[in-house]
Amino acid sequence: MANKKVLLIGIDAFLIDFSSPEFAAFPGLTSEKVEAGMKMTMLKLSELGFDSDLCWTDFGKTAIQLLTKYLTENRYDYILIGAGIRMPPNNFMLFENMVNTIHELAKDSKICFNTIPTDTMEAILRIDSFNSVAKAL
């Protein structure tokens, strides 16, 4: 049986000004911490039998173009949209466009959400567990 495949979507951490008011909800985060957290998450997911891709985007239209590329070239069981996209009010339209792109191009994928980079794995496992229980019913 093939490994389940996960797409992790987030704003490229090195494009984020973590001192700005819109990222105040993430005290103490730095680009380096976000990057390290995502690499660790991908390693842990691999150890649990998941294959994962990381889709670092910008804040603009190329984000949707990049997401479209990932979704047309691969099939994903789970797609995680990071908190850095969902939570800052200025990213509302980007988040909405991403959800609609996923809905259009990856209808069978389950969407999940983290609250910080370090709980990404828990979000994926939560949805995977729910999906497994639902299938058993």
Image (tube, rainbow, N blue to C red):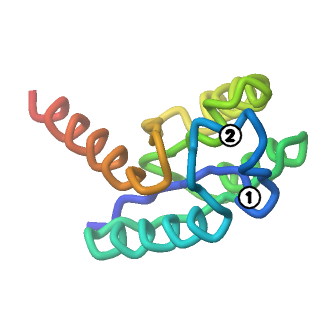
Residue that appears at 44% across and 46% down: 78
Q: Is residue 125 left or right of residue 19?
A: left
What amino acid type should be assigned to the residue bearing mark 2? Phe
- Which label sits on residue 12? 1
Which one is in front, 38 or 97? 38
Residue that appears at 83% across and 43% down: 59
Q: Place residue 32 in its image quadrant.
A: bottom right
Horizontal and vertical percent position of residue 129: 20, 42
Q: Place residue 4 in its image quadrant.
A: bottom left
Residue that appears at 69% across and 30% down: 88
* Circle nearer the N terminus (2, 1): 1
Q: Which residue is mark 2?
A: 23
- Which label sits on residue 59? none
Q: Is residue 118 left or right of residue 21?
A: left
Residue that appears at 70% across and 24% down: 96
**Vertical comparison of 74 with 126: above or below:** below
Which one is in front, 33 or 51? 33
Q: Is residue 101 left or right of residue 26?
A: right
**Vertical comparison of 136 with 100: above or below:** below
**Vertical comparison of 115 with 44: above or below:** above
**Vertical comparison of 92 with 124: above or below:** above
What amino acid type should be assigned to the residue bearing mark 1? Asp
Horizontal and vertical percent position of residue 16: 77, 52
Horizontal and vertical percent position of residue 116: 48, 47
User: Image quadrant for the N terminus?
Assistant: bottom left
Could you say whether the residue bearing mark 2 is in a helix, strand or loop? Answer: helix
Q: Place residue 86 in its image quadrant.
A: top right
User: Image quadrant for the C terminus?
Assistant: top left
